[in-house]
Image (spheres, helix red, strand yellow):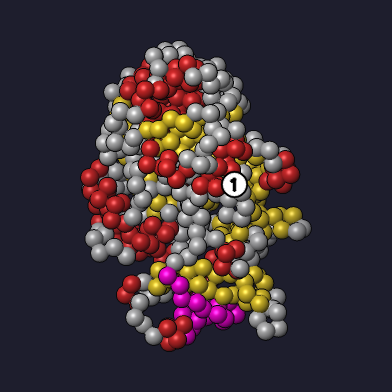
Amino acid sequence: MSEASGNAVDYFIDRHLREGRGERLAFVDPHRSLTYAQLYEATCRFAAGLRAAGIERERRIALVMLDTVDFPVAFWGAIRAGVIPVPINTLLPADITGYILADSRAAALFISAPLLPALRPAARRVGRIVTSNPDGSASPFNAFLGGADETPAECSPDETAFWLYSSGSTGNPKGVRHVHSSLRATSDTYGRQVLGIQPDDRMFSAAKLFFAYGLGNSMTFPMAVGAATVLFPDRPTPDAVLATMRQHNPTMFGGVPTLYAGLLAHRELGVGAGSSRLRRCISAGEPLPEHIGKRWREVVGTDILDGIGSTEMLHIFLSNRPDDIRYGTTGKAVPGYDLRILDAGGDAADGEPGELVVRGPSAAEGYWNQRDKSRRTFRGEWTHTGDTYTRDADGYYRYCGRSDDMLKVGGIWVSPFEVEEALIGHPAVLEAAVVGHPDDDDLIKPKAFVVLQQSAAGADRAALATALRDHVKQQIGVWKYPRWLEFVDILPKTATGKIQRYKLRA
């Protein structure tokens, strides 16, 4: 086992064996577990299997894999070999997965066996398909592992290590290329200085490994310090999450606001959310409404650190911190990152909305085969997020919505998220989404789509609509209330849980 300074696998796996942490637990799923020594051996064997299969350095392999111990074996085994793993969202429609397989020119597809039947037509052009069984039983994945191969590929820290595909809420996903050094950059910044993860922590992230947020939660941050991760391959329903929390007693939990809202509505939620060791909860993927954070603290006894990251920046770069939480805001810049809010005239004044741009060590090197979009997003050292924010006089950043979602009502900017947050603050509302809609004079006004709590399912809809409009007026201003209010059973979302407002506008 030799040190390969530029290859990320050395820092996240091999270093732990050199420093005597090989027997520490790295991953546990419902059927199996891996220590760091076992993870080292398995990634060596996966790298050897790639070489034996003739898959050369810098080729891409696609991972359509559930969250089991096979995922980190494949991801880090590929990086060990200098091959580029491309995790793909397991919830995508088959045609979008087929697009990604073709766009990435994947040399092989590693896929959890239950997912293959639906994707077999989309994967027909991939030269090699290797299935793994989530329960760890004999599979082609096990047979693929070759003999031990201890030598990581020599890599530059600036060399591409892996790709992630953007969520593609308004078109085909974009391949985001990340370099080896970006992984450690996120653990040195957010993981160490905000999350404060320690070797004895145990992480459970409901956000999956194919998602940039979940990748950091479940691999980068715990592996940086030799901590353990609980992997859960199934859908993270409130029932399943609480059962996993009770079984494994994690100290840290990573979720998204929709899940936190669902858990708060669960009759069995209590102190620690089922874990006697829970000390920290984090949220990203979409902004956390203020009342959800405060209610979680009351019921569970732990604050939620709300932050924002992106596939392009790999993880969270703006966040609340354990000793500095202001619910309703996204907090302040993570140490190591610089932020600006830009309007048409340059840097926006405090309180004025503009596009959030970020500079930091984990920025991607660009999109694959998307030159124009790369130029628009990655401009010198600054990455343009497409999110509209304001910054208050105390330096806290507040989310207003996507730049193309902002509404101008009566000559005044209105944030859809602000209206949504006000609606969700009403006890009858579970979820809400707000979009612009033309009135009879073709002027844009807010329209709300509302999902009710089960307890309000039998309420008089007309009376409730009036009550919700009055509630918004009282909370955020009389001109911001939704002129139309439509009750729906579900909101359209991407596979990563983001509301697809363009479908509501249509």
- Quarter-of-image position of residue 227: top left
Looking at the rendered structure, the secondary structure element under dot 1 is loop
Q: Quadrant of the N terminus?
A: top left
What residue is rendered at 35% in x and 77% in y? 456
Residue 232 percent location from the top left of the image: 33, 43
- Quarter-of-image position of residue 137: top left
What residue is rendered at 50% in x and 72% in y? 449
Q: Viewer-proximal residue, 219 or 88?
A: 88
Q: How many marks?
A: 1
Q: Viewer-proximal residue, 152 or 385?
A: 152
Q: Check disc 1 and give the amino acid type.
A: Pro
In the rendered view, tell whether residue 84 sits above or below residue 282: above
Q: Is residue 183 visible?
A: no
Residue 181 percent location from the top left of the image: 55, 29
Q: Is residue 270 visible?
A: yes
Q: Residue furthest right?
A: 345
In the rendered view, tell whether residue 375 sits above or below residue 184: below
Q: Quadrant of the C terminus?
A: bottom right
In the picture provided, is 231 more to the left or to the right than 84? left
- Quarter-of-image position of residue 347: bottom right
In the rendered view, tell whether residue 288 sits above or below residue 5: below
Residue 130 percent location from the top left of the image: 43, 30
In the picture provided, is 504 more to the left or to the right than 199? right
* Residue identified by numbered label 1: 173
Magenta segment includes 41: no
In the picture provided, is 496 more to the left or to the right than 348? left
Q: Which residues are magenta?
A: 466-489
What residue is rendered at 59% in x and 21% in y? 156
Residue 288 percent location from the top left of the image: 46, 59
Magenta segment includes 481: yes
